Image (cartoon, coloured by chain):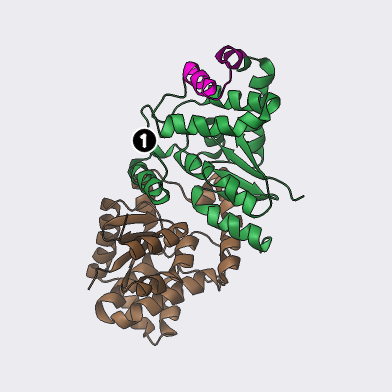
Chain colours: A brown, B green
Amino acid sequence: MPSAIDFHFDFSSPYAYFASTQVDALAARHGRQCRWRPMLLAPAFQASGNVRLIDQPMKGVYSRHDWDRVARLHGIPYGLPDPFPVATVAAARAFWWLDATRPELAKPFGHAIFAAYFADGRNISEREVVAEVGASLGIAPADLLAAIELPEIKARLRQETEGAIADGVFGAPFLVVDGEPFWGFDRLPMVEEWLRRGGW
Amino acid sequence: MPSAIDFHFDFSSPYAYFASTQVDALAARHGRQCRWRPMLLAPAFQASGNVRLIDQPMKGVYSRHDWDRVARLHGIPYGLPDPFPVATVAAARAFWWLDATRPELAKPFGHAIFAAYFADGRNISEREVVAEVGASLGIAPADLLAAIELPEIKARLRQETEGAIADGVFGAPFLVVDGEPFWGFDRLPMVEEWLRRGGW
């Protein structure tokens, strides 16, 4: 069986949200699994000298316009949330806890977190909001709130972020196919071509 | 007749070079002209807080790899030149001089400059090299070398760069279709879709 496609992202990235609506189908078309790997982008930006799009004078204006445009093109429910961006520690930890304990819920939870933030404008930096999103999938809020304080879950997200940076991940979405890196939502067609041809 | 597509670029951008091999055919498929508009990226980077890809710790490594990969995919002759990047004042001024005086030569000259730098590894920051590239198209070197010192040609490039920045151009390639901005070689398929649908 060919190896899974790694999908590195931060729950606060609009382009990662857009990608999340397509990556599993893309992988499946080529007989692959897609492994969702939430991380924290802030340390990656620090390591790479990257700056949040929204804070860049001209690129920020372009990006706001582009997020709306991309969402319209693909029919993805989207509005720029306020506040934006936000810290996604609680959401990412909850994902990794589910991944370790109830893996069948991890991706549905990921989709629900993205939708809560970008479609419904809820503040996913708040742990209570994360717990409510989990509750909509039948996850007991108390369990989730306890889990995201567990040392091993904290360590899991830290390792994930550090490992991604060590592997060259500097932005999101960032896909890796058999070691080949692809950065950006715009690159999904190239990922597809890479899978179709087996590289070039 | 629908308005021309504006193609803003710096002759030192690999992604702009890749785009230059496709933009005219793309425009023609939709009954449009493509207007080549060389500028200097350095002031645009200053205005936008952008940093040259090659100077960014992690994105620089990714970009070098990506330029090779994109060139292979599209069958474009390419090698990372040394030195890279370079100042393209002489080449851009020569383009605008041709655009004003012998417009039928402007795009052939633009293609030849890109190829000299990215396919043949010649240092297009040197005015003598720019003059030799012109000579290959029948342009007298003495005429070109004199032209790029003319105050009105210097002013033309300055205005072009300032105008592009005022219009929100922060990187290259940067295409504008009826006021709609598209940044990056990756966006050519979206430009095509925009032209096909007349926007969305």
**Residue extent of the magenta highlight:** B126-146
Can you say which quadrant of the picture contains the N terminus of chain A? bottom left
Query: Mark 1 — residue?
Result: B80
Q: Quadrant of residue B94?
A: top right
Find the residue positioned furthest to the bottom. A138
Residue B104 vs residue A102, the one in the foreground:
B104
Give coordinates of residue A139: x percent, y percent.
Answer: 37, 85
Residue B152 vs residue B32, the one in the foreground:
B32
**Residue at 60% in and 42% down:** B7
Residue B29 vs residue A44, the one in the foreground:
B29
B6 vs A32, left or right, is right
In the rendered image, the vertical position of residue A43 relative to residue B35, given as above or below = below
Q: Quadrant of residue A138?
A: bottom left
Can you say which quadrant of the picture contains the C terminus of chain A? bottom left
Give coordinates of residue A134: x percent, y percent.
Answer: 40, 80
**Residue at 50% in and 29% down:** B113
Residue B127 lies in the magenta stretch: yes
Q: Visible in this render: residue B181? A: no
Q: How many marks?
A: 1
Numbered disc 1: secondary structure: loop
Magenta span main SS: helix
Name which residue type carries label 1.
Leu
Give coordinates of residue A140: x percent, y percent.
Answer: 36, 85
Residue A170 vs residue B10, the one in the foreground:
B10
**Residue at 59% in and 39% down:** B8
